[in-house]
Image (cartoon, rainbow, N blue to C red):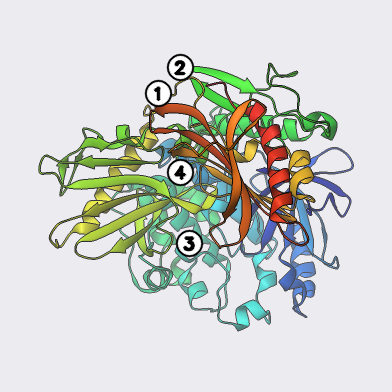
């Protein structure tokens, strides 16, 4: 969930919106409030759909039918406007994480939870099919784990993108490759039986952590869906009896939702069917919504993504620094007026957790096939660790953006895997949740070519992923460290406006860098390295100030200083780089970047 940024709409139809819940192939979803105070999820379809002559009529027809669905296990459609410049649909907001998020964070669901999931989804599909709809995109991301059971979302929308739309004329398929039916993969007419195939694939993923047809690439996955038989040997017998007929290639051989419910039998009532992590995520989601709903004049003083607070973890305690969003100059460093605690994201593959994890502890002392037992060789960097075996062969575990040019490599511990390499070198990586340009990966290099370099890299990464999920590998954070800070939480929007305004967007560049985009760009980077050359003082701090080009070669002005000394030659550093556009000169950029530095300095922990 992200706060709105400059340029986002304040209202959609009669709904006031205040956060972005997510985005996908059809559009993005905003969190809003109806006139009667109910929370709603407002889906705005991508603008290019609005230019398709038949889309609006199909959208109108599907929305009308969708509003007839009112089952207990769906998020009911409340409203829509097919004729708006950007068509939208509003449904009841259901607090809870997506199934995909839970499995990524905690691994497969326990059998009792899978049983409740199967029953809820079968009831939801029965209600959807009763109205004549076919969901068409039943996948883990479209199943919300609410407190009392699952909820199916986004039904009745994918059909509107089919037909004569430009999207399908270009040869694309509407749906998610690992969960679509064979007939959908072949662009054949769909019946409700198509959703039962997706239902079966989804249950396999929930129970094992991976889909039954996931291949090394999208074409391979689609081939598997149409031609390959799934390996169901890992499923409990009761679950296999349900899933196997659902995954029949012939739609006529698949059961109906009522047949699935009969096979399941009575479901024992429980207070909550889910693992504890789900309830924790729901509580944190509600807390974040509560903060975002506060009046803007107060919300700017609180943690949240619009004007966040910085949570510092030091020696096992939490220190909280409030960030002001007022238009007045920042006050001197000291205790904040209204301390606010922001909950960190418990997702082990999320940025909050990865900033605190000691990567060396994930693999130090672990046995990796092809290498044997590893020990730490160099753990001085924040986001990488070099480990080696008894023969001196090394493996690097790292977080960064260097693996983005790699190839799809199938599935690793339920996560999409990418690999890159040859017989001597290989890298393997999985994504950092919420950061599409960042990865957690391993790299191996052998002095002579070996046949299994990529297997070794994948095995090492798999071990790290399992250790990360298990928890208990946080680094020891000394007082004053920058290691746990979110760089995008160091300037409030009003302060960025004064430097590069009007602020249009705030973008994470990996774990340690944030880019504020407006009239020009301002980057805030935290890291380790040699101390900058001192040229002057700013607010009592020795700093470096001067011209510097960004990665694209554009000239700007950089302000940098050492925040905390680690050794005579190395420290934790802060760098701000402002690249101007238009009439602003580099000299003027140097004046502006010092304004940003003055606002940011009081927000840093005292070293």
For residue 315, the mark is 2
Of mark 2 and mark 1, the one earlier in the sequence is 2
Q: Is the C-beta separation of discs 1 and 3 under 8 Å? A: no
Dot 3: few (<14), some (14–19), or many (≥20) neighbours within 10 Å? many
Of mark 1 and mark 3, the one earlier in the sequence is 3
Frontmost of labels 3 and 2 is 2
Q: Secondary structure at mark 3?
A: helix
Of mark 4 and mark 1, the one earlier in the sequence is 4
Frontmost of labels 1 and 3 is 1
Q: Is the C-beta separation of discs 4 and 1 under 8 Å? A: no
Frontmost of labels 4 and 2 is 2
Q: Secondary structure at mark 2?
A: loop
Q: Secondary structure at mark 4?
A: helix
For residue 103, the mark is 4
x 37%, y 38%: residue = 381
Residue 128 is situated, as x and y percent measured from the top left of the image, at 65, 57
Of mark 4 and mark 3, the one earlier in the sequence is 4
């Amino acid at each position: 969930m992200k706060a709105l940024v400059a340029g986002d709409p304040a209202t959609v139809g009669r709904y006031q919106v205040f956060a972005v819940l997510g985005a996908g192939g059809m559009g993005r979803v905003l969190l809003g409030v109806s006139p009667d105070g109910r929370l709603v999820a407002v889906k705005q379809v991508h603008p290019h759909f609005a230019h398709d002559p038949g889309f609006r009529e199909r959208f109108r027809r599907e929305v009308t039918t969708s509003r007839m669905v009112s089952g207990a296990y769906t998020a009911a459609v409340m409203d829509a406007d097919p004729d708006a410049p950007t068509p939208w649909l509003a449904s009841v907001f259901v607090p809870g994480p997506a199934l995909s998020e839970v499995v990524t964070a905690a691994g497969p669901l326990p059998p009792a939870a899978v049983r409740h999931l199967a029953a809820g989804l079968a009831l939801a599909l029965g209600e959807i099919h009763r109205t004549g709809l076919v969901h068409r995109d039943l996948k883990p991301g479209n199943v919300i784990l609410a407190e009392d059971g699952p909820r199916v979302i986004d039904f009745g929308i994918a059909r509107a993108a089919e037909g004569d739309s430009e999207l399908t004329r270009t040869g694309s398929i509407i749906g998610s490759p690992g969960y679509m039916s064979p007939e959908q993969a072949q662009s054949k007419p769909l019946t409700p039986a198509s959703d039962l195939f997706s239902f079966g694939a989804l249950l396999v993923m929930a129970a094992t952590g991976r889909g039954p047809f996931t291949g090394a690439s999208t074409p391979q996955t689609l081939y598997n869906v149409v031609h390959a038989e799934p390996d169901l040997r890992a499923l409990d017998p009761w679950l296999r009896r349900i899933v196997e007929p659902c995954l029949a290639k012939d739609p006529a051989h698949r059961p109906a939702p009522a047949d699935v419910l009969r096979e399941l039998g009575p479901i024992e009532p429980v207070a909550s069917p889910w693992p504890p992590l789900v309830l924790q995520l729901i509580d944190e989601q509600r807390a974040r919504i509560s903060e975002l709903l506060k009046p803007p004049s107060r919300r700017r003083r609180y943690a949240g993504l619009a004007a966040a607070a910085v949570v510092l973890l030091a020696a096992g305690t939490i220190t909280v620094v409030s960030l002001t969003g007022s238009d007045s100059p920042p006050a001197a460093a000291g205790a904040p007026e209204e301390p606010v605690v922001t909950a960190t994201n418990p997702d082990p593959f999320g940025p909050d957790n990865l900033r605190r994890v000691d990567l060396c502890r994930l693999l130090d002392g672990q046995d990796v096939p092809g290498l044997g037992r590893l020990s730490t060789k160099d753990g001085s960097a924040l986001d990488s660790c070099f480990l080696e075996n008894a023969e001196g062969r090394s493996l690097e575990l790292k977080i960064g953006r260097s693996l983005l040019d790699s190839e799809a490599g199938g599935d690793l511990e339920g996560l999409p895997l990418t690999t890159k390499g040859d017989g001597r070198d290989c890298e393997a990586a999985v994504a950092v949740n919420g950061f599409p340009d960042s990865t957690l990966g391993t790299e191996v290099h052998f002095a002579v070519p070996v046949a299994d370099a990529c297997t070794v890299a994948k095995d090492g990464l798999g071990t790290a992923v399992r250790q990360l999920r298990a928890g208990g590998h946080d680094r020891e954070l000394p007082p004053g460290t920058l290691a746990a800070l979110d760089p995008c939480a160091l300037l409030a929007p009003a302060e960025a406006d004064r430097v590069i305004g009007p602020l249009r967007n705030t973008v994470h560049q990996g774990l340690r860098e944030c880019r504020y985009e407006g009239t020009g760009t301002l980057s805030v980077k935290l890291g380790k390295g040699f101390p900058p050359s001192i040229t002057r003082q700013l607010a009592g701090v020795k700093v470096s100030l001067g011209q510097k080009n960004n990665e694209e070669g554009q000239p700007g002005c950089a302000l940098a200083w050492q925040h905390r000394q680690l050794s005579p030659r190395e420290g934790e550093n802060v760098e701000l780089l402002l690249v101007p556009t238009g009439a602003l000169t580099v000299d003027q950029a140097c004046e502006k970047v010092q304004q940003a530095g003055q606002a940011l300095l009081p927000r840093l922990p005292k070293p």
